[in-house]
Image (tube, grey):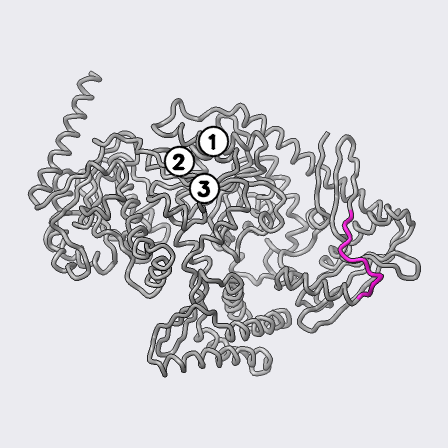
Amino acid sequence: MHRGKIAVRKIVEFILRRGDLDNGGRSGHTALEGARIHRKLQAAAGDEYQKEVFLKIESQLGEDQLIVEGRADGIFKKDDRWVIDEIKTSEVAFEDLSEDQIELFFFQAMVYAYIYGTEQQVTEIDVQLTYYQTTEELITRQVRHYTLTELEDFYQNLIQEYHKWLLFQEEWREKRNASLQTLVFPYEGYRKGQRELAVAAYKTLKTKQKLFVEAPTGTGKTISTLFPALKALGEDEADRIFYLTAKTITRQVAEEALKRLDQIGAQVKVITLTAKDKIAFAEENTQNPEDNPYSKGYYNRVNDGVWDLLHHENLITREVIEHYARKHMLSPFEFSLDISLWCDVIIGDYNYLFDPTVYLRRFFEENEEEYFFLIDEAHNLVSRSREMYSAQLSSLKGELLYEKIGKEHQKLRRALNKVTKEFKKIDAIGKEDGWTFHHQQAPAEQLIKTLYALQEKIKEWLAAFPEDSAHELILDYYFDLLHFLKISEFYDDHYETTIQRSANELIIKQFCMEPAPFLKDSLNKGKASILFSASLSPLSYYQEVLGGEAEALRYKLPSPFEEQQQKILITNYIQTTYQKRQESLPKIVAAVYQMVETKIGNYMVFFPSYRYLDEAVDLFKETYPEINVLIQDTKMDEAEREAFLEKFVADPERSLVAFCVLGGIFSEGIDLKGTRLIGTAIVGVGLPQLNPEQELIRSYYDEKNHQGFDYAYQLPGMNKVLQAAGRVIRGSHDHGVVLLLDQRFNTTRYKKLFPLHWHSATVVYQPNQLSDELQKFWESRDVSASDKLSTAE
């Protein structure tokens, strides 16, 4: 026997929703606004009106049992007959709602009417739809009369249709759990540190805690966290796993690990979510939304598409989603979200959990399930979350919009003009006081007030004029506005308001200096979390800035590789501070050449800025024209990045040196194994550029814990260095060199941040010493390789 529970709204929307993907019936206001309007209408209905009435029914479906429950907005008696009231609010005029949308409203009320009618043992009952249009504050009411027999037929058909989904869900869970309980580690043995990490992860998940893990490259972090998470999932410790990361390549690593587990018997539904702009079909972007065949009638077809896919696929990659989306004529992004509700593992970007404007509401808003969060490359979450919880608005964008809007739209133009006037007031203060950058702890309250008024006018306008030529521009501005206002709701003492003035533009930003409290709230939506990275030092810093708080656990693994596989060299004779950059260039170029010339191979050199990089490249090419050079461009698409990396061939006949930017796309996440990369040189200690925002972070942490420079500059910079250095040794048979080209690496301040396997780093004090050390390392590797060959023979 299977037993399930579902909310009235969810079962109705899932089984009975029909029509287009965007049929205009969706409301743009917040849940708080909707609740406020509900309370207002309920209060106006009088004392006899029962509000928010909890209703529940248990139904038998053969041997199975289903509980359907929810809260009716209102119940009252009229002319001796019970009436169920369903309240809906939106900006859209009632006459512009689609028939499908109106029917869906009534369907929800009909379920409540059946439950209540059964409880009261009545033969007839009325259903009332109360629709409140927010922009004009218009109320429309429609009443339909039903017999209890009609409602019973409707309800039985509804739950019978849902029964097959309930059966599928319960039977799949039993099958999944049985397979995971017998699942074995997918490799013959554990790498050094892997078993310990897997055990620590398993215990963390079982005991509902947060764990911060630094596990160096080569540990096998992905499988060492996924495997124990799946074992715990198989014991019904959670409902699903979210594997979240910042980059496409790390999502692919997770896919590969789950594919391996699938091959040895793991029965798990896994989906990878791809950003909407990347997965949308090309023809979707060239058509008007109302003509898009993939969104038109979407809800008429989506359940058939989901059913088809779930019965044929377990590993649901982007390609799989696209195949079934074309087969069933469904918009692929929305289709992927609908499928995700039935999946055990969801792989995706950080923003699906942490971003306050785009997080997955279907999972995290009305959370009745238990989740495990696996956060990969967690060091990236520091800067990413600061961006997520910050928002800015430009005066210029609003002024340009004003010019594009026809003069007949006076209400909207007036609202835009009021916002422009607020910007001008702030600009006038800046001119008078003579600043181009200003910051304050207090929010820009008057501006925010006018922005809320503008938001209402834009909502009204978008609903009323969908065909206007300015619609797309206004929609784009509207999203900026919504984000800015959303962030204003979080504004507290973790924020500063910054104002940047230029000749023709004013940019106001709500800058989040410490997003830790908000990350903590997001992590608390899960039962347990594991945050891991190859570079998470010091762990105490990441535990604090990523919302772990004092009760979180910490775990640090040693490198799985032998120290002899890698040579770390610190050039104490090179200074790369800003004042010494020009003076340092010849020494840097010479050191890079010494690295490349000692052994034929592929190398990368990382610079703190493109300007520094360009100057070094020019000198290197002029001095050593015979060396094959690659240069990272400022903007590279996916194809260009792949073409760049394809130049790194195994066992090259001629050396290649690639000049790249520290913290850029090639300094982390890439996997050039074996002889595809045998050395890197890192110029400088990676300090972020001095700018007003970094200085605000510095001041904030100076006041909080007297570690402002560390938190704003040193620790983020050192993380970039560790990531870039981690490109060299990727496998157990790799060998390579890392040159740290800055004498600051030889100071206590930086040495204390070195990972354990860097403690044998060699300091060189002059160029010929560097050459000697490089020569000795590669000669020892060649001897070692020939010894192994002799032994094998």
Quarter of the rendering occupied by the C terminus: top left
Q: Nearer the viewer, mark 3 or mark 1?
A: 3
Is label 2 in a helix, a strand or a loop? helix
Q: Quadrant of residue 414?
A: bottom right
Give yes or no for contact between labels 2 and 3 (Cβ–Cβ under 8 Å).
no
Pair 2/3: label in front = 3
Whole-Å distance between the Cαs marked 3 and 1?
21 Å
For disc 2, the marked residue is: 221
Q: Quick one: label 3 or label 1, which is nearer the N terminus?
A: 1
User: Where residue 266 sits in the image (x, y, percent)?
Assistant: 52, 29
- Give the residue at x 40% y 72%: 499
Horizontal arrangement in the rendering, residue 791 relative to residue 305 (left or right): left
Residue found 42% across the figure and 56% down from its top? 514
| Mark 2 crowd level (few <14, some 14–19, many ≥20, 10 Å Cα) | many
Residue 760 visible in the shown view: yes
Q: Which residues are magenta?
A: 45-55
Nearest to N terminus: mark 2 or mark 3: 2
Tell me the amino acid under the disc marked 1: Phe
Q: CA distance from mark 2 to mark 1?
A: 10 Å
Q: Which numbered tag is attached to residue 552?
A: 3
| Label at residue 159 | none
Whether residue 316 can be seen here: no
- Categorize mark 3 by other alpha carbons within 10 Å: few (<14), some (14-19), many (20+): some
Helix or strand or loop: what does disc 3 sit on? Answer: loop
Looking at the image, tell me whether mark 2 or mark 1 is earlier in sequence order: 2
Task: Residue 227: give its label.
Answer: 1
